[in-house]
Amino acid sequence: MAGSPHASSGPHHALRDYTRTPLNVYWEMTQACALACRHCRAEAMPSAHPNELTFDESLGFLDQLGEFGTPLPHLILTGGDPLNRPDLFQLIAEARRRGLGVSITPAATAQLSFEVLLRLKESGVEGLGLSLDGSSAATHDAIRGIPGTFARTMQAIQWAESLELPIQINTLAAAETAHDISAIYELLKPHDIARWSLFFLISVGRGKVLQPLSPEDSESLMAWIFDVSKASPFIVATTEAPSYRRVAIELMRAQGLTGEQMKRSGPLRGAGIRDGHGIMFVSSTGEICPAGFLPISAGNVRTHRVAEVYREAPLFKSLHDPRQFEERCGYCEYNALCGGSRARAFEATGTPLGTDPLCLYIPRQPGRADTNS
């Protein structure tokens, strides 16, 4: 699966009520993709799903997004490989005509040419998400499953830079890639990257063949991310690791920063956003889910209204309220700011309201006076 960029905060970010409107809607336009990535959430395949949304059904879905009202969510086109949709540029035009901001996460295949990037730019696409899981062809291509993807990705970065098309790079953080992450950072530093996001593996789809980082190694990596972010020429962020916000707060407190200084800091951008709260995912067949890595359907765009599902479906309402989370995540003092990865909690416990096992923090239990119990 190609990586999924989060939209930049934008002028309405601070005014948005995430119980009413997501910041980002991820639309898996198709499952069709020529790559064979070892960690693919979508379990992408060479051809489209036979029940994929048609062009007319896709227009209906775009119409529904307008029901969120102002500010509208940002639409991120993902897959599979969205370049495999023959009506891609028509749908981008229709989304832009409806006032939606659009970003895209294409796969690094032969289809991803300079001409395609130019056309995306001219179509009003605001951001490009590319995946880079190794600092060399040997390491990256081993994860992506197809030789040549590293070279194509680096070429696409250069083309996007020349077109001044904002780039987000997504990097897998897993046992197989951890040793290479600092080298990837050094590789990216000379480039005009807007954001680098490290995706902490969740074992869904084909990702079950890879090994996630241990909580201890994850905590160490988050501390490294915090240190690097202070001097990085681009934003450094995490995906499916909201506990990074807690780690960052603890490190900032140790440095003597005030609460107001913390609020303005890079690591707390997007604080409070988590699966199903600030984020919504629509599959290629129209299923409405809290996130791509949390594949529990709360409805389908063919039979339900996306805004109503996001605001009123019991699944989403529970995800909007961190007080409903179970065990540590439920009573943690950071739960509104962090809330844990609901996708990882579901994978580990069988309920999206469970505790995120990636987090080492032991909060004070209600009714106890000690700070760690």
Image (spheres, grey):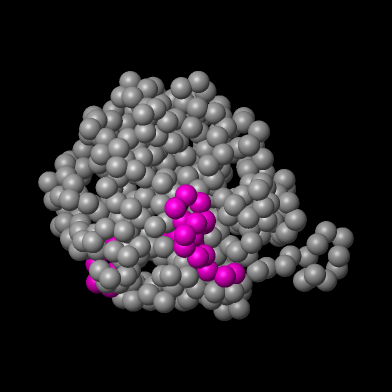
Residue pictured at 22% horizontal, 51% vertical? 109
Q: Residue 115 location in percent, x, y?
A: 12, 46
Looking at the image, the residue that sits furthest to the bottom is 255
Query: What quarter of the picture does the C terminus occupy?
Result: bottom right
Compared with 132, 324 (above or below) is: above
Query: Which quadrant would residue 37 be assigned to in this image?
Result: bottom left
Q: Residue 238 location in percent, x, y?
A: 47, 61
Q: Nearer the viewer, residue 322 or 256?
A: 322
Q: Residue 223 location in percent, x, y?
A: 52, 74
Q: Nearer the viewer, residue 21 or 158?
A: 158
Query: Is any atom of residue 26 visible in this view?
Result: yes
Query: Which quadrant would residue 77 be assigned to in this image?
Result: top left
Compared with 118, 232 (above or below) is: below
Residue 340 horizontal side relative to residue 170, left or right:
right
Residue pictured at 37% horizontal, 33% vertical? 49
Q: Which residues are magenta?
A: 187-215
Residue pictured at 83% horizontal, 71% vertical? 370
Asked if residue 85 is among those painted magenta in the image, a careful observer would answer no
Residue 261 horizontal side relative to residue 27, left or right:
right
Q: How many marks?
A: 0
